Image (tube, rainbow, N blue to C red):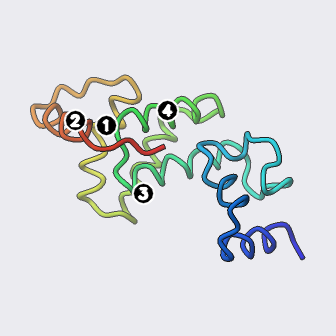
Amino acid sequence: MSEARDLLRRLAAHDDHSLKRAMAPTPEFEPGYALTNPALDRRTRVLVRLAALIAVGASTESLRWAVELASTSGADEDALAAVLVATGSAAGSARLVETAPRLALALGFELGLADAGSATARADQRPKHA
């Protein structure tokens, strides 16, 4: 049985040990990572993580953490903005417009838009996702 098939089987069976490893903030950096030969390289994994955070409406602080992780993995600002656009096409325009100011803040940009401040203030009152 392949590693991926075994992992999916254990997760589907609600295996506590596998779930804890998979749900760690950065499972690929944990000892005993579930997949010893991951199909995605590190840069791709952290970009997928950023896309997931965007899709669930994560806070600015969570996006900042993902941006820092992606930056240390070789992703530049253009790649991070491309993740927002790609995620927006799947998650919808409302999510894209809502997340854009928070991603800009996470990248250290000031947008200077009147609505960006209020959107960011509302967004920062949300629960943090990691």
Element under disc 1: helix
**Cβ atoms at labels 2 and 1 below 8 Å apart:** yes
Q: Earlier in the sequence, mark 3 or mark 4?
A: 4
Q: Badge 4, how many Cα within 10 Å: few under 14, some, many 20+?
A: some
User: Looking at the image, which residue is at 34% across and 51% down?
Assistant: 57
Kindly report the distance in space between the C-alpha atoms of the residues bearing marks 2 and 4: 16 Å
Q: Residue furthest left?
A: 114
Element under disc 4: helix
Which residue is label 1 attached to? 102
Which residue is label 2 attached to? 120
Which residue is label 4 attached to? 65
Element under disc 2: helix
Q: Earlier in the sequence, mark 1 or mark 3?
A: 3
Residue 73 relative to residue 59: left or right: right
Which residue is label 3 attached to? 87
Kindly report the distance in space between the C-alpha atoms of the residues bearing marks 2 and 3: 19 Å
Q: Earlier in the sequence, mark 2 or mark 4?
A: 4
Q: The disc labelled 3 sits on which kind of residue? A: Thr
Q: Badge 2, how many Cα within 10 Å: few under 14, some, many 20+?
A: many
